[in-house]
Image (spheres, coloured by chain):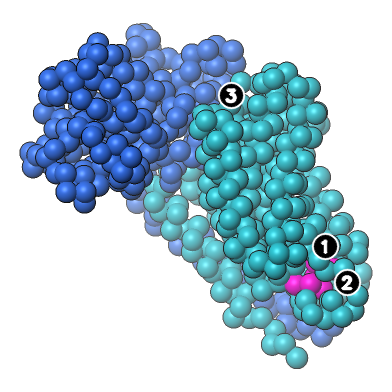
Chain colours: A blue, B cyan
Amino acid sequence: MAGSFTFYPMKSLRCFLSLAACALAALPGCNRSEPAAAGSAAASGAGKPTIALVVKTLNNPFFIDMQKGAEEAAKKAGVNLIVQAADREIDVERQMQIIENLIERKVSALCIAPSGSREIVPVIVKANKAGIPVLIVDTRVDEKALAAAGGKIVTFIGSDNNDGGKLAGAFVAEKLGGKGNVAVLEGIPGHETGDARLRGFREAVAAFPGLKIVASQPANWERDQGFNVFQNILQSNPTVTALFACNDLMALGATEAIAAAGKAGKIVVVGFDAQPEAREAIKKGTMAATVAQFASRMGSTAVENAHKLLAGEKIAPFTPVAIELVK
Amino acid sequence: MKPRELLTHYGRQFGTLAGLLVLCAVLWALTPHFLTVSNLLNVAQQTAINAVIAVGLTFVIISGGIDLSVGSIVAFAGVVMATLLQRAVPVPLAILAGLGFGFGCGLANGLLISFGRLPPFIATLGMMSMARGGGLLFTDGRPVSGFDEGFRWLATGELLHVPVPVVVMLAVYAIAHFVLRLTPFGRYLFAMGGNEEAAVLSGVPVRFHKTLVYGVCGLLSALASVLLTARLNSAQPIAGINYELDAIAATVIGGTSLMGGQGSVVGTLIGALIMGVLRNGLNLLGVSSFVQQVVIGAVIILAVLLDTAFKRPKR
């Protein structure tokens, strides 16, 4: 170790400078994105309330639509908007960190699409303590867990996923003439959105004794997993004639598996969310239907409600957003 | 130690620390929300989980190995402990069981590596998949949620106004620093990582200590899992995905060499704090999550690049 003394101070200096440079490199990014996210040409947003929208991820077109809707509403209402998300849809701890940081930033209102219905509760309580109103979008919070922790939310803005599942189930029954083998691709287990869709679908299917759900497997909302899991389902259940996927990404992944198995057009594929790509697939005939969830309307309603709330208006505890089948 | 020796010994850490301070200064200049007591405690709490895992990885990496299974052990140990908690097992017992479970998973890694002669990358890659699958099987893929206040205290409580997770993190680092610098185990880690053959020839019980270091790493992952479970009030079998990468990043930013034989836990703590501060600061500034990923990647590369570029040539 002796003798290295002459060198190290230099090294410290270099480390110092480089990290400084690195930190500075981050600056243009933030200067650019803040006004852009605010959707306002004005460089200074002083005096205007800042509303934060924290979605699950921005890798999913559904949440990008939600972001767009929120940005338009923010522009109209003249409020600053910050949209943030974790890198991974299932990373609820990271989502929690983001929300804590926004609480430190003292945003005026928080709109959250929770990555975990129960796991989000502690941070809602933190926001409550900081006096920041919380509006929940898209995925319901577990009400029991919220009540147990003494947390409060202003409103839930979203569709009734249960109804969406029922629409999908009724459509599959109609398409198959009330009999056949059905497969299901689930979202992440224990995730309220997916569970509600699943419940609705099962309920609708149960009304037809000829319809049988022969396989129901989670593909964790992801496209590649939708492909793989459905490929495996096809191996073990070659008689499947319909598939309900709890979101479009998994459905789109599954259509590739169907094509690879040479069964294109022989399996009725129903997705959820009505993403542009799914609508294309319906036109092409690789998918039969999808349930439209109007993410952008959820985003805009969330910001509008937050704005009204900040202006002192009362908000209903549930703001339904329409749901319909696209075929 | 004389100041001169101090500088020699901790030169690298001074560099990393300077980086952290500059980062803080820049954020302080950019946003009024950064340098507040509550935000700094907030950053420390957010850093605690990664920092605790990173201690284990620092030990393993100093010994010349790698552990990819930490994130999966976080998930598996978490659901095991959470299930016990829900079956009304007393909190300390459930925590001990969780820690023991993590230690066991780690020991299994260590045995495969030292006695089975598997490369650490392979053994822990296997464990990564097995522990992940094990956790999913154990809970049928569902999260285990809802614990009583006594357990939640580990996330929500304070000791002398310092949040409990931060206290735990600091205690872990104090102990780890002591272990690494002042115990035979610590010295053997450096010896094994520096030159394993030489260590064997000088009579270091290499196999035993190699097995033990993976056990310690598993134990610390389980400890992180306790903090995570209390924080979320829920143990998820899908928790901790990619945590190994965050912990490796903190370790290398802190100046520990991936080649083994060199490193310090103090550096790792600063490395973990740099990552935590960066994420926090970028959130406070409202920077998009895409830009954040680019920035964090750049910091990792820069830190190691500097380390390599200016490393004193070996004599």
The residue positioned 49% from the left and 61% from the top of the image is B297
Earlier in the chain: of badge 2 and badge 3, it is 3
Taking A170 as reference, is B178 left or right? right
Instruction: Give, as a three-letter code, the residue at label 2.
Output: Val
The residue positioned 34% from the left and 31% from the top of the image is A215
* Relative vertical location of residue A63 with respect to residue B210 in this rendering, above or below: above
* Relative vertical location of residue A239 with respect to residue A228 in this rendering, above or below: above
**Is the same chain shared between marks 2 and 1?**
yes
Q: Does residue A264 show up magenta in the picture? A: no
Instruction: Give, as a three-letter code, the residue at label 3.
Output: Ser
* Relative vertical location of residue A143 with respect to residue B61 in this rendering, above or below: above
Query: Where is residue A265 drawn, in percent x and y?
Result: 11, 40
Query: Where is residue B286 drawn, in percent x and y?
Result: 43, 43
Q: In which image quadrant can residue B41 be found?
A: top right
Circles 1, 3 touching at the beta carbon (< 8 Å) = no
Q: Secondary structure at mark 1?
A: helix
Which circle, 2 or 3, is nearer the viewer? 2
Q: Which residue is mark 1?
A: B209
Q: Which residue is mark 3?
A: B145
Q: Secondary structure at mark 2?
A: loop
Q: Which residue is mark 2?
A: B204
Instruction: Give, as a three-letter code, the residue at label 1.
Output: His
Residue B51 visible in the shown view? no
- Relative depth, front residue between B192 and A111: B192
Is disc 2 surrounded by few (<14), some (14 to 19) or many (20+) residues within 10 Å? many
Is disc 3 surrounded by few (<14), some (14 to 19) or many (20+) residues within 10 Å? many
The residue positioned 59% from the left and 74% from the top of the image is B306
Query: Which contiguous range is marked in magenta?
Result: B188-193
